[in-house]
Amino acid sequence: MVTKENVLEALQPVKEPTLKQSLTDLGLVRDMMIRESSVSMSVVLHPDSIGQSSEVERVIAQALSGLAVSVPNLRIRAMNEHELSEVSAKLSGASGKSAEKPKEAPVRGHGAGLEQDTILHPDNGVEFIAIASGKGGVGKSTVTVNLAVALARKGKRVGLIDSDIYGFSVPDMMGIEERPEQVGDKIKPIERLGVKVMSMGFFVEDNSPIVWRGPMLGKMLRNFFAEIDWGELDYLLLDLPPGTGDVALDIHQMIPQSKEIIVTTPHATAAFVAARAGAMAIKTNHQIIGVVENMSYFESKETGNREYVFGRGGGGKLAETLNTELLAQFPLGAPDNHPSEPDFSPSVYKADSDIGKEYLVLAQSVIERCGK
């Protein structure tokens, strides 16, 4: 059976393109998993090397071909500032003298090799809020779009990135049918209900499935930050994919200053799984500003009685586990919207509806916690 040591030995000759040193010697091969003849791993590259990701992938596959393993499943990402410092120190120690600092891309503080005029630059003053969940089906995207619209109704300048690249749903939920247009060298996001929106769904024909691997997903996410003309924003919300996979990890590393809201249902298992997403936020030094419990109860229109379909207490228990607050509890239901309305959106509650008012309260809580 192939072992981790076998793989690292086979990769010894593979060099990082910019630093010209062995990937394994620099400790840039991470998160390796071996199952039978399948190998998956993360490879960290200098930001200047990201453009050579495909060549690195080819060389790694060739290096491992003698081990009788299938094509490796790779996730390639750029170093963040801390990792750049560590590698620089390692190179200095190896040479016995102060080594020249590796050539850097324009931005270092945000870990993705992006240009200084992107939305990620700290001088832009944007508050990033990632909306996460441990599993699908808890209404995370519903919470995201309604919070974004509620913040806009509060007079804030709001952007929204549908980061759930495999399961994009925001355009449909907000009733967006048009596509973004390119103006100069930038793409203009679609503005709907006061929110500037960007989604993978705008670039896919006929609801086709996305079959990309990790590196391609990372490139698309970086494009959402670097190639979009967001203008001036107060808040940029990110609807993360459920769980703690590649895309969620990329977001955490690209935006180290992001705050986070965890969405769950009251069901004990959903809250248990959501704790993993919270643990990931904590591990990557993201501030969790609260928990939102969705589908908390079903309220009968006839009697007003509440039925707790998914149990009770999951959101509160999750907030306690993550040492944060339960910000809101939303009932099971759907907006009473009609397709004939001029601003029809299937999933956005009207401002004067009961749940719409509750989202305004949530928006105010978020504003207070972000200090904006």
Image: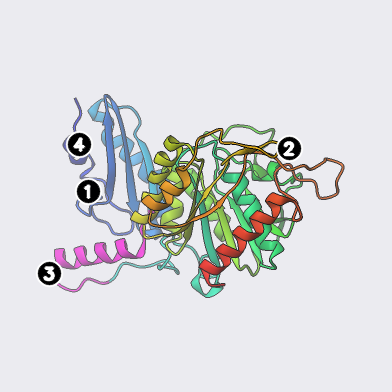
Q: Amino acid at mark 1?
A: Thr
Check the image and name the residue furthest to the left. Answer: 96
Tell me, yes or no, whether the two marked residues, 2 and 1, touch with CB atoms within 8 Å.
Answer: no
Residue count near mark 3 (Cα–Cα under 10 Å), binned few <14, some 14–19, many ≥20: few
SS label for mark 1: loop
Tag in front: 2 or 1: 2
Whether 12 is drawn above or below 328: the answer is above
Residue 287 in percent (x, y) is at 42, 61
Q: Counting residues from the N terminus, which is met first, the one under dot 1 or under dot 3?
A: 1
Residue 205 in percent (x, y) is at 68, 36
SS label for mark 4: helix
Label 1 and label 3: CA atoms lie apart by 20 Å
Q: Amino acid at mark 4?
A: Lys
Tell me, yes or no, whether the two marked residues, 4 and 3, touch with CB atoms within 8 Å.
Answer: no
Tell me the quarter of the picture where residue 332 sits: top right
Q: Amino acid at mark 2?
A: Lys
Label 2 and label 3: CA atoms lie apart by 75 Å
Label 2 and label 1: CA atoms lie apart by 63 Å
Whether 130 is drawn above or below 62: the answer is below
Say which residue label 2 marks: 301
Residue count near mark 4 (Cα–Cα under 10 Å), binned few <14, some 14–19, many ≥20: few
| Residue 24's disc number | 1
Residue 341 in sight from this viewpoint? yes
Q: Amino acid at mark 3?
A: Gly
Say which residue label 3 marks: 96
For the residue pair 357 and 148, the one nearer the viewer reads as 357
Q: What is the magenta range?
A: 78-100
